[in-house]
Image (tube, helix red, strand yellow):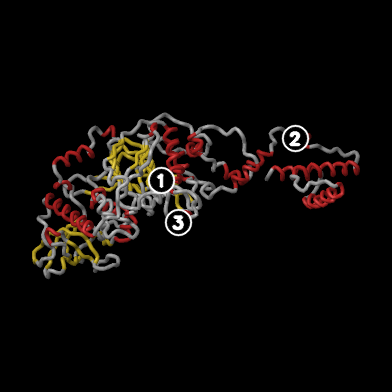
Amino acid sequence: MTAKSFRSLTYCINYKLSPSDLVSNWEIYYLNRQLNGLKLENAHMDGFLSYLQNEMKQKIIKEDAHLHVYSSDDLEMLLGDDHDTTAGILNTPNSQYEKPHVDTYNSVSTPKTKENLLSSKDATDISSRITPFGQRISKFTSQFVFNSESVENRLSGQDLNDMEDDIIRRVQTTERCNLQVHHLQPQSGCRFMYDRTEDRFNYLDNRIRKHANAFTSYGLYGEPSDATLASQKNTFAVGMVCCDGEGHLNEKSILMQGSTELSGGRRVRLDLQKLAHFSLFPGQVIGVEGHNPSGHCLIATKVIDYLPSSLDVDLPPAKKLAMDQDYQPTSSNDSRVLSVLIAAGPFTTTDNLLFEPLKELLAYASRRQPQLVILMGPFVDSDHPEIKKGTVDRVFDDIFHVEILRKLYDYTKYMGPSARVILLPSIRDAHHDFVFPQPAFDIRQPDDISQQIACLPNPGLFSANEISFGCCTIDILKQLSGEEISRTSADTMSGDRMGRLATHILGQRSYYPLYPPSLGVPLDLSLAPEALDIPLIPDILILPSDLAPLVKVLSHKENNAEATKCMCVNPGRLAKGIGGGTFVELHYNSEPEKSNASIIRI
């Protein structure tokens, strides 16, 4: 109810008027205006009510001389000082949505209370701009908790209620994490779109050769041979899975391409009828045990779809030493403790470019104070309706600097030197290079926070507190799910498909093992093919995807060797349509079994 409506209702109550009487008095008003020659065409409702009140007051006094008439001052005195029209405005249904919609992050960067209440005009303007995201009721709800028995730092009910406060109170400063970036390929400003067919062929052949050398060094499968030669004896061959046509892979269309060193790059059909279980996709490099009686079809009896641990057998000693220094921890597990927030774009809803989810994420981070915040693109999403239609009146770079970087600068300045932020681009970023592998953002940071925000290429590899992270913003999980074919045995659990897809990334030691690439992926193998390799299995592998959010420990035991464990995280999308999405809050403690993580819906 507006202030004018409140006064109108008060007037009707005082003078025992119905709404129809009030409407009819508009005629009295216009009649008196014409008779008296008053020019009140532009008068406000306040002036009309005052005029009408005096006219009706005189009329009632004449009719009943003993009737006492209360003035507006008398009414305020009887009701008390607390009866304020502004308070009535803020208690309306519209204002109930306005309070959660208060720019929480602005209170983070400038933690000051608002001294003045909103006027009726301002309240009306704000209510007309309330978005569906701002009207949501549930905020920061936990959708899934990994290793819940070890959770010690989850949000309590009181914490969730405090998130509605206008002021984000600061807590004790956390310890700054030790951040090291291991790979910066390709470089910013590099030239791309120069790859040739020869570059692609050499890349694929090098992958097959690398796997063959690793299998040979492992010493359990024998020397790889040419799979295209006819033989009645069991042989061991290494090659890449291919499809014999343009469609999707199926059991009848599977081919295996050998290396140029062993088979001259020729292909042979692969028969999988004797296998109880398998999981294959185009571009996957596998080892196959079987025989080829006719020379045209390799009948497989065993498929090895992972790369043995001895990946760096053909690297020079200096390279080995450098890798060992970069990737292996140098101190005890006591230092391998880290709190981190992980979120992937889009960071704004599809109905506007206000970036409300990002604001609330940073407000949440200011309360929880993680040591590290990992933000993965897209930041300026090329699939956003306004960008696709071309209705945006700003340059994409300006949107990125104003809506993203400026908020991150304010966040790091407010949180102090202990806050660290990592940014990874996406091929959907409208303001960045459309190529994969993708160079890092080239931004100029203020001198006082230049060491707090780090920009990584896509894919990227870094370590924080000696905990290694591997990240890639290409939706490889979704693309693999559309290309993979599998068979599971009766005694094997087949429900963990997401875990199986993520295991392919580690088993192939590649952030993008799929070939040919999915439609829309600008794969350039001449740019920096080594950037796609995963030298050693990271502690945490982050793979944002449109599929269901995921926090899962992947482990693979190679014969009698100790199982290598990796925590795979799909944080989901921070914004989905016109509503909020999910992000992950992770507390890593030396190893996955002692760590905990929560998938939180914003």
Q: Amino acid at mark 1?
A: Phe
Q: Report which quarter residue 460 is drawn in.
A: top left
- Give the CA separation, mark 2 to mark 1: 51 Å
The residue indicated by pointer 2 is: 76
The residue indicated by pointer 1 is: 583
| Disc on the earlier residue, 3 or 2 | 2
- The N terminus lies in quadrant: top right
Q: Amino acid at mark 3?
A: Lys
Q: Secondary structure at mark 3?
A: helix
- Give the CA separation, mark 3 to mark 2: 56 Å
Number of dots carrying numbers: 3
Residues tagged 3 and 1 counted as in contact (Cβ below 8 A): no
Q: Secondary structure at mark 2?
A: helix
Horizontally, residue 155 falls left or right of residue 276, namely right
Q: Residues within 10 Å of mark 3 (few under 14, many from 20)?
A: few
* Residue 409, above or below 396: above
Residue 452 at x, y = what percent?
37, 35
| Disc on the earlier residue, 3 or 1 | 3
Q: Report which quarter residue 444 is drawn in.
A: top left
* Residue 518, above or below 595: below
Residue in the image at 29% along x and 60% along y: 484
Residue in the image at 46% along x and 45% along y: 357
Horizontally, residue 213 falls left or right of residue 492, namely left
Q: Secondary structure at mark 1?
A: strand
Residues tagged 2 and 1 counted as in contact (Cβ below 8 A): no
The residue indicated by pointer 3 is: 388
Residue 413 at x, y = what percent?
43, 33
Q: Report which quarter residue 59 is drawn in.
A: top right
Please state which of the two labelled residues, at mark 3 or mark 1, is closer to the viewer.
Answer: 3
Residue 148 in view, yes or no: no
Residue 307 at x, y = what percent?
19, 51
Q: Residues within 10 Å of mark 1 (few under 14, many from 20)?
A: many
